[in-house]
Amino acid sequence: MSRATPAVQAGAAPVEGAAPALELLVHGVGGTTPQAMLDDPRTVRVTGDDTAAIYRRAEDVDAEAHPERHRGRPLPEAYVWCNLTSGNSARALWLLLLPFMVVNLAHWMRPPATRPLWAIRLYGALVRLVALSLTVLLVAAACEVALDLTAWQCGGSAGCSGSRDWLGFASVAHHGWWSQPGRRLALAALAPAGLTALLWYLSNRTWSAYESQQPLNADPADGPGVAEGPAFGRPGFWYGRRLVARLRAAHTAAGFLTAATGVTAAAARYDRAATSALFETLGLLLESTLAISGVVVVWVVCRRGRTESHLDQQLDRAVTTWLPASSLALLALAMLYAGWDRADWVSSGTLPGDRAFGFLTFAQGVLVVALAAVARYLRRTAPGERTALCGLGGPAVAMLACALGGVMTGGVAQRVGDWLDRGATPGMNRTVFEGPPPLLSWQASVIPVLLVLLVPVVLFFAVRTWRTARADAPRVMADYPTERADTARTRQIAAARAMAGLTDRTPLFVGIVSGASLLLGAAALAGAWWTSEVPGRAAAGGPSPIAYAADTAQSLGSWCTGFGFILFVTWGRRAYKDAAARRTIGILWDVGTFWPRAAHPFAPPCYAERAVPDLAWRMNTWTERTGGRLVISGHSQGSVLAAAAVWQLPARTRRRVALLTYGCPVERLYGRWFPTYFGPAPLHDLHQEVHCWRNLWRATDPIGGPVLAGDDVDRGPLLDPLAYGRTAEHPLPAPILGHSDYQADPDFAHERALLLAELASGVPNQRADQGSSGRSSG
């Protein structure tokens, strides 16, 4: 994150006219402080709250009443939004939601097609179904740990439960009230039910801070086309309250139903083998009701998508209230049914329903393949040159979300099984209990294989980057024609440019990882279904090399999942206590939670639903009140927020607003991965609406880049470093700035002054000082 210095820069051209001018600074990922942004230890919050606010220097609080103080330079303001993603310690719990955040991104990666509508709607429905499967997977993993491994297997084994005091009251060896399998299952069901309630709580508590924020109302003078224009300009784009509430109810119900199914299936199977017709009928009725409720949940998820054409403030009360409540009631009935007295019932083997992980994995694979087919079809109807993975970015990311969810949930089950089995590799030592389902061991076993496959890929990118750096050395010296060559300095600059270029190869890497995960996941599923054994036991009777490879892969996979789980818990615990670590995690959310929760309601909340209305309201009210000119100045992710906020402004306000972006990922990252919203057509539309737009970029910046090729928006690549060797102005070696400190470049103040002059005259200025290469002269 660059240090956002104030608007006072040497060399800025005076701004003529009596109307005041304001520069609204918006920081990027990682966050900062208003003192650093305004370069003044004394700052005052002028509007906002502890979550997000606008600050000024203490001496500038009443600047509008004294315009003579800022004659010739704009008044600086700072919008600080970092607490939206890295504020209090509860943000550490968001690590649990990482797969949900990733699958939510897949919704917004749809290829840029407007027709046919059925394919667009099908794409959204498929992503929402993948998201629903991740919720079921997480709760199913909790059921596996609590119901199967702990209550059913360990509680039913005197050798396992006898050595654990905390489980002694439910041990079969004690023959107590809780020793019956059904009662142990009913008690253990509180764990997945509690997890579901926690997910609901984390999602619901963000409503007041995010989804309830009213966007800036559209200006009726703009005409009816505002709802049909670019997506970011639609009135309801940043107001997803209705859909999130609907999806939250459905996913909460799915969690409760998953726990209820795990409890009911075991008791119903026992009753079908027993002689009690009453209990058999009750079990059949309960299973049928659970199945019908599951169909209702799927229907609710598929039925409605986002409403962006208008500000939809309705809530589906029947769905949001009765669906979770009825599912919770079914869970209570399932616990009561399973806890009824069955004196002869003994738990043995694994809990019925352990194959559910296989069916769930198969369903996820089918959904991802179907999503890829729809995305490919949409891509063919609207081809684009810079679309990531030829339009398959969404399916690839959805596949990664499924793989990440499988690793996280499988890792928990593997570690609990390892602990209960007293350190033995899960599934290999069955003297105590059976262990987790074999599929989880197969999935862990393919992790070392995936890592081995990625080694040549990483080496390929490393060699290519090295060659690019060598080839770029002559171009480096061409940018400093008056300097004497220094081999070490040239290599340093060329290496920085080559490393920055790796960003453009990210889609290929993601595609390789996603494709390998799909194929290896299919192989793991086939192996588990074919053998019904863990890899080590399945290959025990085969040739020695195969048996050794299978045993090694299983052991390494179990170790990898264990290490990942420990790292995950350690990172979460540190983030809970350490604000600096929490801010590091917040950087991940800064990038991943820009988009509204359109697919998964349990994903971390969308901070842009608060930040974009904040910025739009500030720009609109300040220009209306003062009649002045405003430059919104955004760095990195702040430039994305700035562009999205400008899209929301009424036409009369946009005529008084200029957009200055630097280190901007709008086209380089967002344009490739989210072409429907940041592709060439939407960006050209934005430029038509905002004539005064400058974008500064560097070749050494791994994140920012040009936004509109061949247009007058981009200014760059700027020289980086500013000086090749030691000069009178730079007696010490100038650093390579990369993504930071754009305000240190003289072109920053110059371009800002030009933007303000354009706003004053109403006619965009033509830059005469830019050479044919487009590089900064300073």
Image (tube, grey):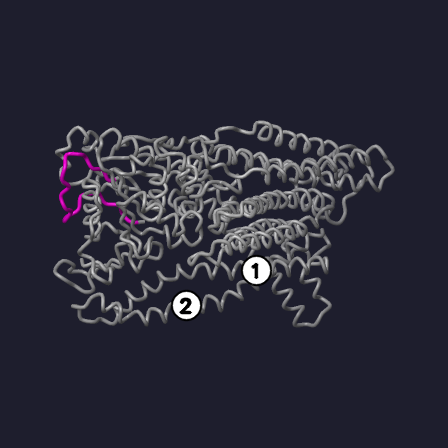
Give how far across and how far down residue 519 sits, in percent: 60, 61
Query: What is the span of residues highlighted in magenta in the rendered image?
Result: 2-23
Give how far across and how far down residue 599 sits, in percent: 53, 42
Identity of the amino acid at label 2? Ala
597 shown above or below 106: above
609 shown above or below 753: above
Quadrant (top left, top right, bottom left, bottom right) of the C terminus: bottom left
Q: Provide the residue designation for mark 2.
A: 462
Give the mark, 1 or 2, whose residue is nearer the N terminus. 1
Q: Give the total of numbered labels.
A: 2
Nearer to us in this view, 653 or 411 = 653
Q: Provide the residue designation for mark 1.
A: 447
Can residue 74 be seen here? The reply is yes
- Distance from the alpha carbon under mark 1 to that under mark 2: 22 Å
Magenta stretch encompasses residue 349: no
Identity of the amino acid at label 1? Ile
Q: Secondary structure at mark 2?
A: helix
Can residue 392 be seen here? The reply is no
* 710 lies left or right of 581: left
Near mark 2 (Cα within 10 A), the count class, few <14, some 14-19 or many ≥20, is some
* 57 lies left or right of 27: left
499 shown above or below 382: below
